[in-house]
Amino acid sequence: MSDGSPPERTGDTPAAPGDRPALRAEALTKTHHGEGAPAHAVRGVDLRVERGEFVAVTGPSGAGKSTLLHLLGGLQRPDSGSIRLDGEPTDRWSEARWAVERRKRIGIVFQFFNLVSDLSVADNVELPALLAGQTPRRARAGRGELLDELGLTGKERSMPGELSGGEQQRVALARALVNRPPLLLADEPAGSLDSKGTREVMRLLSRFHRRGQTIVLVTHDARLASAADRVISFFDGRIADDAALDSGPPPRRSGASGVLELRD
Ligand SMILES: Nc1ncnc2c1ncn2[C@@H]1O[C@H](COP(=O)(O)OP(=O)(O)OP(=O)(O)O)[C@@H](O)[C@H]1O
């Protein structure tokens, strides 16, 4: 229909009032054109994530998990398909608009922390808050609260290079969450950590989830995935399985496809 018409009904879900999943992707595709043959990283993915849901996306290397997460966070653009955040279509968002919206409503954490190496811990965490328009006083207060909660009090003036991997990842989490984004996208957030660091990240994600944080987590790690409500198996650019987990560890196999046959 033409522009200006009421929001379209798309996919198999009727557009009921108040029916606003945190995230809705429809028929997403993305092909990377690099040196060699084109990589069909995401091939027609439909995904719905409810508010407050914790979804783990797992699958073999090269399956397209990171690409999917990048699309969901607007870090890459799909070739086709659509993404709605809280029911709002993002298809026409410019890069600048995505940047603004990310600051407000999407926290992103990567495997390699992506901290600014020549800024202190405090500044790394406050920066997104300041960029989002918070007053310095509020940014400082938010930073203090989060660092406290993440067990990093006393590290404010440290530089990232002076911290352990686990500490740096906690700073990255603080930075992703300082604007209290409704949605957290995490790409292998414990990928470079030892088992203690992995446990820490898992505990923190679970804690934020219990408070209502919506989380989409890409991970190879079955332990991390087991903290989620739902595990999506991604294979060859597509969702091969999508299964709810019973709450609380240990996770159980769900059905014949064995979605939790994950190995470290
Ligand atoms: N920027 C890029 N340019 C070219 N090809 C890319 C690019 N990014 C990803 N690819 C290719 O797209 C496919 C999917 O990659 P992606 O990183 O999304 O997979 P993944 O499941 O996250 O893998 P891993 O678990 O190893 O991180 C791979 O074949 C990869 O080589």
Image: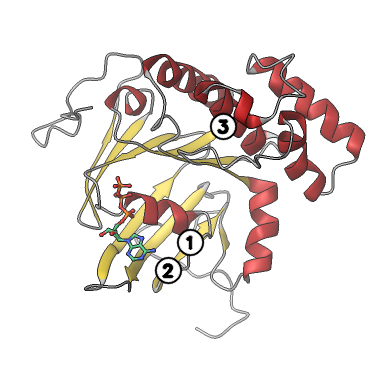
Residue 9 is left or right of residue 168, and the answer is left
The residue nearer to you, when weighing 21 against 204, is: 204
Q: Earlier in the sequence, mark 3 or mark 1?
A: 1
Q: Position of residue 97 (x, y in %)?
A: 68, 65
Is 56 located above or below residue 82 in the figure? above
Name the residue that disc number 1 marks. 83
**Amino acid, disc 3:** Gln
Q: CA distance from mark 3 to mark 2?
A: 25 Å
Secondary structure beneath disc 2? loop
Q: Please indicate whether residue 252 sits to the left or right of residue 102 in the image.
A: left
Dot label at residue 213 = 3
Residue ID at (76%, 30%): 122
Q: How many marks?
A: 3
Residue at which label 2 appears: 78
Image position of 3 (left or right of 43):
right
- Mark 3 or 2: in front is 2
Quarter of the rendering containing residue 179: top right
Camera-nearest residue between 7 and 151: 151
How many residues crowd mark 2 within 10 Å: few (<14), some (14–19), many (20+)?
A: many
Is residue 248 visible in this depiction of the protein? yes
Classify residue 87 by image quadrant: bottom right
Say whether marks 1 and 2 touch (CB < 8 Å): yes
Q: Residue at x 32, y 24 (%)?
A: 226
